[in-house]
Image: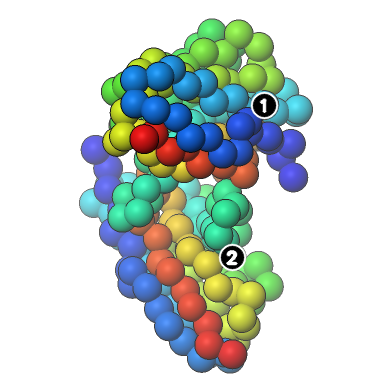
Amino acid sequence: GQQLNQSPQSMFIQEGEDVSMNCTSSSIFNTWLWYKQEPGEGPVLLIALYKAGELTSNGRLTAQFGITRKDSFLNISASIPSDVGIYFCAGGGSNYKLTFGKGTLLTVNP
Amino acid sequence: DAGITQSPRHKVTETGTPVTLRCHQTENHRYMYWYRQDPGHGLRLIHYSYGVKDTDKGEVSDGYSVSRSKTEDFLLTLESATSSQTSVYFCAISLRQSYNEQFFGPGTRLTVL
């Protein structure tokens, strides 16, 4: 089946630093999505991307849909303590199903 | 808020017992999904539904069955629970107009002893 490689697996940064994480796939996707999950809760959708090359922002978050349609990245600028959580990428095709990466655990030191 | 609730939120059961988890939505969405989440594996699709009585398997469907007799409810059943099914289970829905955007419920933590 399809697999997504998400990196890094974990990050430990200082408050105020910028963060970058990415996902790559051997398959093409029509949609890339980024989710954040906090302890004890379900994943929350942050950004959805629908076109190759698309760059979309949501506050301090910026995500891009790679030109090859096989990758995506998420940047967080000026991190704050509440950015702590696990960030997941997901790729979607035309079959109404998503394939998820294994997540990036982000820790922010105040 | 996509109006998704899951019940129970926590459950402890014994190996060999049947377990049913319920996902309820209030906004008449067509597509519903069940995932399990385990450390090191991320979210993996168990089953999904694209309408009443219309369901299909995901990548980890063995040992699980589902039913959807009403639009608002999607049930996940473990016929005979095993310790390997200890996990956190999430239900999700997708919106008709943006079908790849899935929204998740709060999850059910299941422990099989």
Q: Nearer the viewer, residue B35 or A92?
A: B35
* A57 relative to B44, above or below: below
* A11 relative to B5, above or below: below
Report the residue at 48% width, 69% height from top: A74
Q: Which residue is mark 2?
A: A56
Q: Position of residue B112 (x, y in %)?
A: 39, 34
Quadrant in which the N terminus of chain B is drawn:
top right
Q: Are marks 1 and 2 on the same chain?
A: no
Quadrant in which the C terminus of chain B is drawn:
top left
Label 1: state its secondary structure.
strand
Report the residue at 59% width, 90% height from top: A110
* B113 relative to A29, above or below: above
Q: Residues within 10 Å of mark 2 (few under 14, many from 20)?
A: some
Location of residue B101 by image quarter: top right
Q: Is residue B36 visible?
A: no
Mark nearer the viewer, 1 or 2: 1
Identify the coloring: rainbow
Label 2: state its secondary structure.
strand
Residue B24: image tag: 1
Residue B94: image tag: none
Q: Chain of mark 2?
A: A
Q: How many marks?
A: 2
